[in-house]
Image (cartoon, rainbow, N blue to C red):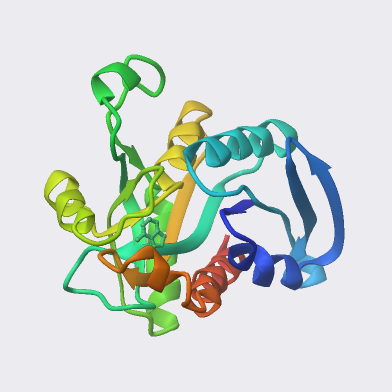
Amino acid sequence: IAVIGAMDVEVELISQSLTRISQSKSAGVTIFDGYLGASTDEIHVVATVAGMGTVNAAATTQHLIDQYHPECVIFSGIAGNLTDSLRINDVVLGKTLVYLDTDMRMISQSAPFTDEYHSDEKLIEIAHAVLDDMNIKHLAGKIATGNTFVEGEKAQAVKQLTNADAVEMEGAAVAHVAARNDVPVLVIRALSDDADTEYETFREFDVSVYADTAAKIVLAIAQKL
Ligand code: ADE
């Protein structure tokens, strides 16, 4: 499986959990290549930090697919909360992913010819089971992706425009590229902030706790694949 995060903290726990790990650099990213699980039943994992935003996410997803032919791609990371039904450190699975500030009348004229993207249903089912086992409050909902940090009054505007449950900067791009390649994808986001939190305040947060929440889910899912 290929695991992608946007920031170092989102991938750290995963790379630390790999055995027989090797590191290489290509396409502008460092790729951790290793194994998870018991030696009789191990899973080959490649994990990398793409950088933030849709271009970094798309380029990295395509690179990993071309280079490693993964059976699935999982994005693990944090997001801003847009729903009253969840709190910080709860989890949104990206059942549906949409872009912000993107005219889908144009973008949907090329593959996969859709105006929204979806995580794989089977992977969502496995994630639900894992999250129930871990006692983590979660929902499979809508994630909005854009190239800006959503803060202040922008949060309400994004909510009105998309009705999304969470906002972040990579998920739709990863799911878009995965769909072009017919590779199943799952986007997992632990909520790190309410999306109206100002960036200057957010910068003070230690988001590693939330990044680790998402990463632990990935590790548990990998055992069930
Ligand atoms: N990632 C975490 N919080 C976010 C926010 N408020 N906007 C965009 N991406 C985020």
Quadrant in which residue 8 is drawn: bottom right
Instruction: Decide if residue 206 is in sight here.
Output: yes
Residue 168 picture location, percent across and down? 39, 54
Q: Which residue is found at the position 53% from the left and 28% from the top?
A: 181
Q: Residue at x 61, y 54 (%)?
A: 3
Seen from the viewer's position, the closer of residues 151 and 1 is 151
> Left of 151 or right of it: where is 34?
right
Q: Which one is nearer the viewer's eye here, 122 or 114?
A: 114
Residue at 24% x, 19% y is: 105
Q: Quadrant of ligand 1?
A: bottom left
Q: Position of residue 63 (x, y in %)?
A: 67, 34
Q: Is residue 156 above or below residue 115?
A: below
Tally the marks: 0
Q: Is residue 191 in sight in this rendering?
A: no
Q: Quadrant of the C terminus?
A: bottom right
**Left or right: where 84 falls relative to 74:** left
Q: Residue furthest left?
A: 160
The percent position of residue 57, horizontal first and vertical second, equals 54, 42
184 over 224 or under it: above or below = above
Name which quarter of the figure residue 219 lies in: bottom right
Q: Is residue 148 above or below residue 153?
A: above
